Image (tube, grey):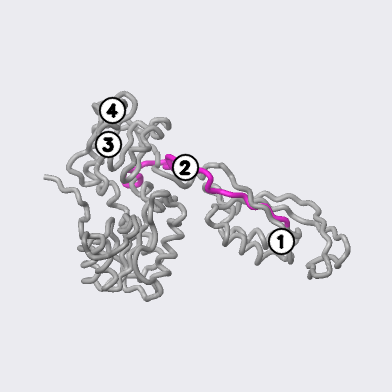
Amino acid sequence: MKIKEVLNALEKFAPLPLQDGFDNAGLQIGLTDVEVTGALLSLDVTEAVIDEAIELGYNLIIAHHPLLFKGYKSITGKDYVERCILKAIKNDIVVYAAHTNLDNAPQGVNYKIASILGLENVRVLSAKDNQLSKLVTFVPSKYAGEVRKALFEAGCGSIGNYDFCSYNVEGEGTFRANNDANPFAGQKGELHYEKETRIETIFPNYKASSIISALLKAHPYEEVAYDIYPLSNTWQQVGAGVIGTLPKPVSSFEFLKEIKQKFKVGCVLHNCSVDRDIQRIALCGGAGSFLIPTALGQGADLFLTGEIKYHDFFGYDNKIILAAIGHYESEQYTNNLLFDYLKECFPKLKTIISTVNTNPIKYL
């Protein structure tokens, strides 16, 4: 199989339009129309990671954090990023990043963290707004099922745990074909009445192009009437962080010790005494302190993330327990998430999690 097939599968799981505005997820280096020899998974891209790929004979590195966040006017090897660029190109290695698009995706990074902690009833903590649209089209009634099927296959009609969602109303349409038309029904120059079904269905904005293509292909009319309405709804399945509950209340002290053990960290930074029971847990891998007010507003007993600034620990002692375990430590299981997904999609693809610890922070 070719590298582009692997990347296409990744982008179905974590579509690039879901990334945050500051991000640079996606293809970073290399040509994808070549056969993949193996995929190496790593949280970051460093020279040691590229050396590992070379030793393995793998030509694809899939990282969580992008190697490239800015443009370069010259590449001379003056820092580790430029050296990585040169080494990857020289050895025909493709570098790809799945970053905040994977954080924000349904069942993405934060869902993985929640599963490790045993949380139940997990949902997105801060859902994205203005990501959805509604398609309305009018179809001859006997062709409505065929058109609905094409729209659903293209990505329409998913609402939470339900798919194939649409609303349908029977009515009558009118049109008159001019002399240049090739009408599906009716005669040129004559007013025609047609029994039609009005189909309404929802879709993510980034799928608009493929959905319109599917509609035009499946619809029998020469000229297809359709409307697209932007929606201000929040997309509850997509966004930053998650919140869930433990099966039963536990001691906050014992839960912090469990976090320390499961994430293999030397210490857990927290903001207040931990002598009470907790059950409702919010979390966000990486630098998630911007979600503290949201977690508090949704009634979380504890908020876990990778990084919290010094002053952000103040003011919450009697409201919510804040806990930070390190950026790298909080996201370390991202590699396992990607490994499981790729193995499900491509059982024969050689896929390995890097043995290189890329954490730039060291502890005595």
Mark 1 vs mark 3, CA separation in Å: 55 Å
Q: At numbered mark 4, what does the secondary structure look like: helix, strand or loop?
A: loop
Quadrant (top left/top right/bottom left/bottom right) for the C terminus: top left
Quadrant (top left/top right/bottom left/bottom right) for the N terminus: bottom left
In this figure, which residue is indicated by the disc labeled 4?
314
Q: Where is 187 relative to 125, above or below? A: below
Q: Where is 201 relative to 142, above or below? A: above
Q: Position of residue 183 (x, y in %)?
A: 79, 68
Q: At numbered mark 2, what does the secondary structure look like: helix, strand or loop?
A: strand
Q: Is residue 114 visible?
A: yes
Marks 4 and 1 close (CB-CB < 8 Å): no
| Image mark for residue 224 | 1
Image quadrant in which you'd find residue 282 = top left
Of the two numbered discs 4 and 2 in the rendering, the one whose residue sits closer to the viewer: 4
In this figure, which residue is indicated by the disc labeled 2?
127
- Give the residue type that dot 4 points to: Phe
- Give the residue type that dot 2 points to: Ala
- Give the residue type that dot 3 points to: Lys
Q: What residue span does the magenta drawing correspond to?
A: 114-138
Mark 2 vs mark 1, CA separation in Å: 34 Å
Image quadrant in which you'd find residue 254 = top left
In this figure, which residue is indicated by the disc labeled 3?
309
Marks 1 and 3 close (CB-CB < 8 Å): no
> Magenta region, mostly helix, strand or loop?
strand
- In the image, taking residue 341 as reference, residue 89 lies left or right, namely left
**Outermost bottom residue:** 35
Q: Position of residue 348 (x, y in %)?
A: 35, 71
- In the image, taking residue 205 as reference, residue 248 lies left or right, namely left
Q: Position of residue 59 (x, y in %)?
A: 30, 71
Query: Which residue lies at the image location 35% right of the left edge and 31% below the top edge?
Result: 301
Of the two numbered discs 2 and 1 in the rendering, the one whose residue sits closer to the viewer: 1
